[in-house]
Amino acid sequence: MIEEQPDLKVAAAIGTNENILQKINTLKPHIALLDLGLRSQNSLQVVKSVKKSFSNTKIIVMDLVPVHEDILEFVQAGVSGFIVKDATVDDFLQTIRSVSKGNKVLPPNLTNSLFSQIVGFAVSGQKSSSLIKSVRMTKREKQVIELIADGLTNKEIAQKLHLSTHTIKSHVHNILEKLALHTRVQITKYAHANEGFKEIADRISFIDD
């Protein structure tokens, strides 16, 4: 499929048992496509090793359904693009061409989301007041985030805040929507593990409950 394109050329296809770094050192490809579905080795470590030894080689990862935590980790490790399971041939080729020009390509469902901004600032190491201001949370929602991060269930949060469990579920739903996340587990992971996310939580813009 790639070879049919006049502006693209496949340098090699590498199996899981081959020495990837040695092959890249010999061929010096502009772009490396990494299939995350091949779990026989640590894909994240492969990315880190390639970027450490060959910083000029851009990496695009292909996955079935990449989750937010994985995307953030891979971008921080140096990945430039993502190709998801339901990508079309045009999407596939466009991602390769875009990355070759120096662009970062996130999965389409994350484009323009708050999460894509968090990824962008995590990679650049920048802090942005505009990003923080873009998160419009109520004081109650921030309380719920903190309690979720502390490991409390919806029922326990409801008891602590003297609210109904249904109300807490509604707050959790709104938080997930605003932060472009899918599960409360992701809220916990970001609150504990991601410094950029912690800063946003600490300096979040408040509106009335």
Image (tube, grey):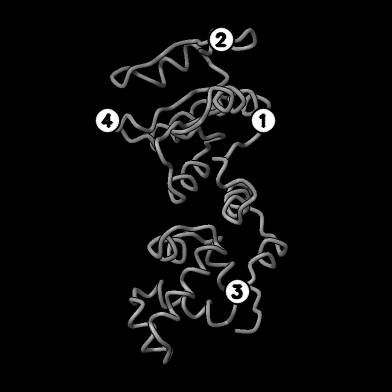
- Eyeballing the image, is 178 above or below 37? below
**Residue 140 image offset from top left, x and y in percent:** 53, 82
Q: Quadrant of residue 99?
A: top right
Determine whether the residue tagged by mark 1 lies in a helix, strand or loop: loop
Mark 1 residue type: Gly
**Residue 37 image offset from top left, x and y in percent:** 34, 32
Residue under the image location 50 percent in, 23 percent down = 32
**Residue 90 image offset from top left, x and y in percent:** 59, 23
Query: Do labels 1 and 4 touch, CB within 8 Å?
Result: no
Q: Earlier in the sequence, mark 1 or mark 4?
A: 4
Q: To which residue does mark 3 refer?
A: 137
Query: Do labels 2 and 1 touch, CB within 8 Å?
Result: no
Determine whether the residue tagged by mark 3 lies in a helix, strand or loop: strand
- Eyeballing the image, is 175 above or below 6? below
Q: Earlier in the sequence, mark 2 or mark 4?
A: 2
Determine whether the residue tagged by mark 2 lies in a helix, strand or loop: loop
Residue under the image location 52 percent in, 68 percent down = 175
Q: Nearer the viewer, mark 3 or mark 1?
A: 3
